[in-house]
Image (cartoon, rainbow, N blue to C red):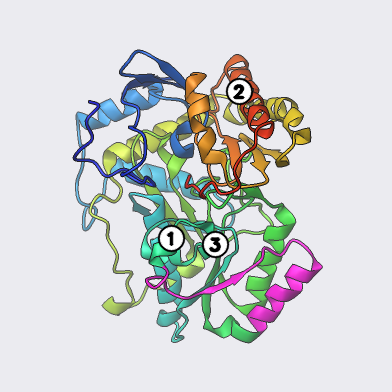
Amino acid sequence: MTCIDSLWLPYTQMATAPAPLPVVGAEGVRIRLADGRELIDGISSWWTMCHGYRHPHIMAAVEAQLATLPHVMFAGLVHEPALKLARRLAALLPGDLKRVFFSESGSVAVEVALKIAVQYWKNRGEDRHQFLAFREGYHGDTLGALSVTDPACGFHEAMAAYRVPHFFADLPRDEASRAALEALLERHGRKIAAAIVEPRVQGAGGMRFHDAATLEAIHAACRAHGLLLIHDEIMTGFGRTGSLFATPPTAVPDILCLSKALTGGTLPLAATIASDTVFAAFCSERLEDAFMHGPTFMANPLACAAANASLDLFETEPRLQQVAAIEAQMRRELEPCRGLPGVADVRVIGAIGVVQLDRPVAAALRPAFVERGLWLRPFGDIVYLAPPFVISAEDLATLTAAVCEVVSDWSTQACSASCPLSTP
């Protein structure tokens, strides 16, 4: 299991990277390695595993579905797990976000949203094929998604000539940035199909936070200039920021994207949810007005069963109360990092805690956490925690203490400012 000659790993320089850690199992908040060690997972397997690994309710739901219908194509056929999940999502989401289009990954959910926005205008007789995105935002690695990701994020330099050009603005956090956004839309608004933003937290772009007022300003600008609005809740959806969804009721988008924790981290699934108003533009007697997109494994019954089971857990177990407790504990226990040399900021929202350094050296700290029996993946200039919501106070204290210790050790050393920017 130590030989990886046939593998090509993500975000990895295969010529120089150390060998990955062989995993043989996982339970709750722990990953079990082939050599017998266990690691406390402090980042929920890329922010997916909100209920912990192998929650028995989700496992039972998937096993029951496997016994009846593991998969069937979703064109001309439909099945109860998808119907049930779509209805539940529509009931939970704000506004008239009622039409659910399933796919298999977050990047594809964004691609679907972008395509819906472009075709919405085409079906209405307008040619709008550009987008407004925000600096320090990240939306995925496929062509459309990377094209609305801030080029400065550093993950896609090699794709610069491949990207589709769009408009980028600073988040409208203050009077100057709101004025700049207004000026951009005054000049280019008629070319723009939609704006896209990650509500409350820009994830892989650096775990940068903003408030509801910022989202309200974006919403108001889109309404004033006749743009659609897309919220990318792939990372923030399902409790991560403290509420079930990060989108406030005062800034409901026209299209919303979900993935990651949708199935509790058990199986790949994503959803792009459009408003009834957007959906209506695709309904006519003309086939060419239909949305011609169809992932092969969309609405996979196993994944839908897992997602329904995950929603059950949000209804029957105290997930949001657990997130509130995690937030309060991380605020207390990460605060000592604030005064350390080289620490630029400490911030917490929901079950996300961030220690931001003053230079992009965080990836060099990863081995120190493994040595302490922890799985964290610092990147760029941040060391962050995004633990499963079911983590105990004791395990969380182990994580926060390690972050403070590792960052303190780093801050006392002569860290090289030439460490390369890393990926999440």
Q: Secondary structure at mark 2?
A: helix
What SS does tag 3 mark?
helix
- Amino acid of disc 2: Ala
How packed mark 2 is, by other alpha carbons closer than 10 Å (few <14, some 14-19, many 20 or more), is some
Q: Which of the numbered marks, if any, corresponds to residue 263?
A: none
Residue 160 occupies quadrant:
bottom left
Q: Residue at x 38, y 23 (%)?
A: 54
Q: Which residue is mark 2?
A: 402
**Which residue is denoted by mark 3 in the rendering?**
152
Q: Nearer the viewer, residue 326 or 334?
A: 334
Which sits earlier in the primary sequence, circle 1 or circle 2? 1
Identity, as a three-letter code, of the amino acid under mark 3:
Ala
Residue 357 vs 98, above or below: the answer is: above
Q: Position of residue 242 (x, y in %)?
A: 64, 37
**Front one among 395 and 93:** 395
Q: Is residue 423 magenta?
A: no
Q: Residue at x 52, y 19 (%)?
A: 372
Image height check: is 129 above or below 173? below
Residue 274, x across and y down, in percent: 47, 61
Q: Which residues are magenta?
A: 160-186
Q: Which residue is mark 1?
A: 156
